[in-house]
Image (spheres, grey):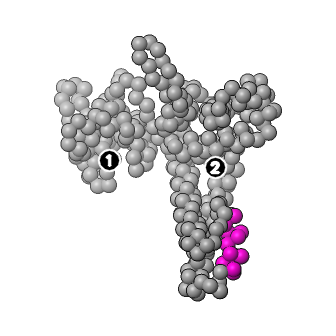
Amino acid sequence: MELNVIAIDIAKKVFQLHWVEPDSGSIERLKLKRAQVLPWFANRAPALVVMEACGGAHEWGRELLKLSHEVRLLPPKMVRPFVHRNKTDAADAQAIWTASRQPGVRFVPVKNEAQQVVLALHRLRAQLMKMRIMQTNELRGLLYEFGIVLPEGHRALLNELPAALRDVQARLPAMLIDSLDEQVRRINQLEVDIGAVERRLSQQLRDTPACKAVAEIPGVGLMTATAIVASMGSLTAFKDAREFAAWIGLVPRQTGTGGRVRQLGISKRGDAYLRTLLMHGARAIVRSDKAVSWPWLAALLKRRPYSVTVAAVANKLARTIWAVLAKGQAWRAQAWHAV
């Protein structure tokens, strides 16, 4: 029997529901406070509950799954085109219901708490790295105003900074030197905080067999292994390796008319963070000695531009990761040599 579809527009305090009664076909709308949502669903027959994949959606999805409901999360970009007039909670809930009924719609896997914990660590590390970049760039720019040119990269900058400050200490006022020293201390503290997060991710890698299996693949390190295992949710969400690569946005875009289809660059849909990690890993492979030891990669470099080769290797990495996790087999170097 097909489950009745109930759409929820979630918020901090007020939730808007939209569904169609299967017996009468009447359109129903209901507004509930946060504390009323779970008791209301506890008294309903099992249904297909659809929500936007926004803040708090995974937690609500886990709670509704405990109540024997089926839960599916929709990407917000797929919902927005169905809000035809004024954007209200009721209109959003109706748009979610309509979007979920479209053929070929792709859903976001509901993540468990352990997966969200790992992704939270990745988000914290990414924020700390952005703050470090801002702090070092500001320091470099301020000193450039006084004729001090420092190298790019935070490590090279911190190595040369003490000597540069000693050279100009006599001609710059003490209040500026003291402020620059405070800036350096803030940067060093960010380094400590980033290292602490990375150690926690390393522990997660050691404790998770799936992460350890993925980390054996060339071009896949600590960050990629932990992020991709936590992000993909359930393996059953993808029917094959190509679908997984398309979910990350590493397959070509297509355009065509009159029966003629052209392949364009990669689609860049999906999780940009995962795609960036895989592209970095692919670039490391292309630059390494493996480009010579693997005949297929050497041949690809000869007939395709460098950036196209990197994207192709990233696509291959995504497919290999899916195969290792879905089939439960360790990565085999012979398989890559044979391609």
Instruction: Report the front residue among 107 and 184.
Output: 184
Q: Is residue 76 visible?
A: yes
Placement of 193 over or under 19, stated as above or below: below
The type of residue carrying mark 2 is: Met
Q: Secondary structure at mark 1?
A: loop
Placement of 54 over or under 196, stated as above or below: above
The answer for how far apart the CA atoms under marks 2 and 1 are is 31 Å
Q: Is residue 247 visible?
A: no
Instruction: Report the front residue among 76 and 20.
Output: 76
Query: What residue is pinned by disc 1?
Result: 10
Residue at position x 64%, y 68% in the image? 149
Q: Where residue 49 is drawn, which disc sits there?
A: none
Q: Given this view, does label 2 or label 1 mark the residue nearer the observer?
A: 2
Q: The C terminus appears in which quarter of the rendering? A: top right
Query: What residue is pinned by disc 2?
Result: 223
Residue 279 place in picture, x, y as percent: 62, 41
Residue 202 place in picture, x, y as percent: 68, 54
Q: The N terminus appears in which quarter of the rendering? A: top left
Residue at position x 51%, y 27% in the image? 264
Residue 267 place in picture, x, y as percent: 50, 33
Residue at position x 65%, y 83% in the image? 169
Span of residues in magenta: 156-167
Q: Is residue 209 magenta?
A: no
Question: In which quarter of the view is residue 236 placed?
Answer: top right
Judged by its main secondary structure, the magenta piece is: helix
> Dot 1, how many residues are within 10 Å of its Cα: few (below 14), some (14-19), or many (20+)?
many
Instruction: Report the front residue among 265 and 268.
Output: 265
Placement of 194 over or under 65, stated as above or below: below
Question: In which quarter of the view is residue 90 placed?
Answer: top left
